[in-house]
Amino acid sequence: SEANELLKSSKKGKLPVVNDNDELVALIARTDLQKNRDFPNASKDSNKQLLVGAAIGTRLDDRERAAALVDAGVDVIVVDSSQGDSLYQIEIVAHLKKKHPEIDVIAGNVVTPSQALHLIQAGADGLRVGMGIGSICTTQEVCAVGRAQASAVYHVAKFAAKYGVPILADGGIKSTGHITKAICCGASCVMMGSMLAGTDEAPGEYFYQDGVRLKRYRGMGSLEAMDKGSEKRYVWEDKKKMTGTDVAAVKVAQGVSGAVQDKGTLRRYIPYLMQGIRHGLQDAGIRSLEEAKAKVYDGTVRFEIRSPAAQKEGGVHGLHSYQKRLY
């Protein structure tokens, strides 16, 4: 563009952009050109700005938060709730699609086609699938609700595909093999918490324990996270009506806090993940993500139940000791 050429020719660090009234409307930096060169595959909009998503809850005041996010230029809004098939979420999804039809809305979490149908009918553009299967989640233990993730992803993705709604596999991802399985089960993308929590770019400070470099990782359902505001995802009753305060009478933890091992910088870790997925799909005879879904649904790619013995022989075994390096 003309602005980029001006920056190159003038060798300046910044280029102010003004309108006809000489009012500042934008600021282009030389670092923007460098980032565009170094990261050509970054997700950007038509204005060459990075795509941005934001999460909101299902309370009434979250509607005001959503309006403010839209005014700030958000591209996608995620309605964050541990149980997506609720009147609260259905109402806020319908509200968002009515007030801000240009914004994509991702709803969830769900694990069955019937749950997915209610959110699709409300106008959801995408669905998060997974309940109680995260590494730091105890929902299945505490609440006795949830579903095996592969079954949830397969059945919800197959159903949602009839409406053209993509799904995100949320939780349980521990390796590149799990990402490949999620894609072959019908997921369009995956959410990774623990896998990315140990990277340099993740929030938190490193610490050492037994000679291992670690970083803290807490579940949104843990009491520590609830104390910071995440209880909105789990507390459904009217707290003021019950206790006269904004504090829930009893908080029931649906997650834990722990630590994950250092994984280094994303600059090295992401290429490793991408290459691992490519190898997995290549070995299965799959050329693209769309082809992966098509081959699963037409029966070309099939899954088998692995016995405990098969799982054991599928991993490292028969060695006195070994060192496992990812890359």
Image (spheres, rainbow, N blue to C red):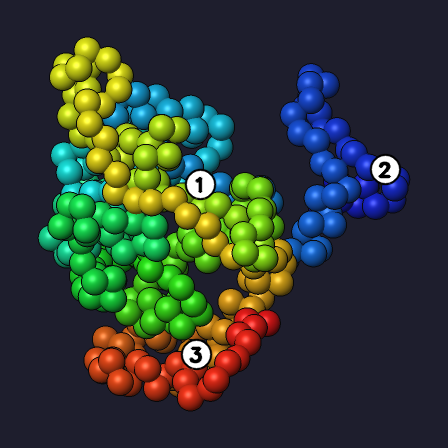
* Left or right for 89, reference 316: left
Instruction: Give the mark toward the camera: 3 or 1.
Output: 3
Task: Tell me the quarter of the picture where residue 18 sits.
Answer: top right
Three-letter amino acid code at the position of disc 1: Gly
Mark 3 vs mark 2, CA separation in Å = 46 Å
* Left or right for 306, reference 36: left
Residue 237 location, x and y as percent?
15, 25
Q: Residue furthest toward the left?
A: 114
Task: Tell me the quarter of the picture where residue 306 sits.
Answer: bottom left
* Mark 3 vs 2, N-terminal side: 2
Mark 3 vs mark 1, CA separation in Å = 29 Å
In the rendering, which numbered label is found on residue 12?
2
Tell me the residue that label 3 is attached to.
Answer: 280
Tell me the residue that label 1 is attached to.
Answer: 53
Determine whether the residue tagged by mark 1 lies in a helix, strand or loop.
Answer: strand
Determine whether the residue tagged by mark 2 lies in a helix, strand or loop.
Answer: loop
Evaluate whether residue 91 shows in this view.
no
Evaluate whether residue 178 shows in this view.
yes
The crowd level at tag 1 (other Cα within 10 Å; few <14, some 14-19, many 20+) is: some
Instruction: Give the mark toward the camera: 2 or 1.
Output: 1
The correct choice, above or below, for 23 with respect to 188 in the image is: above
Instruction: Give the mark toward the camera: 3 or 2.
Output: 3
The correct choice, above or below, for 26 with respect to 160 in the image is: above
**In-front residue for pair 152/291:** 152
Mark 2 vs mark 1, CA separation in Å = 32 Å
Residue 71 location, x and y as percent?
45, 26
Q: Are marks 3 and 1 in contact (CB under 8 Å)?
A: no
Three-letter amino acid code at the position of disc 3: Gly
* Mark 3 vs 1, N-terminal side: 1
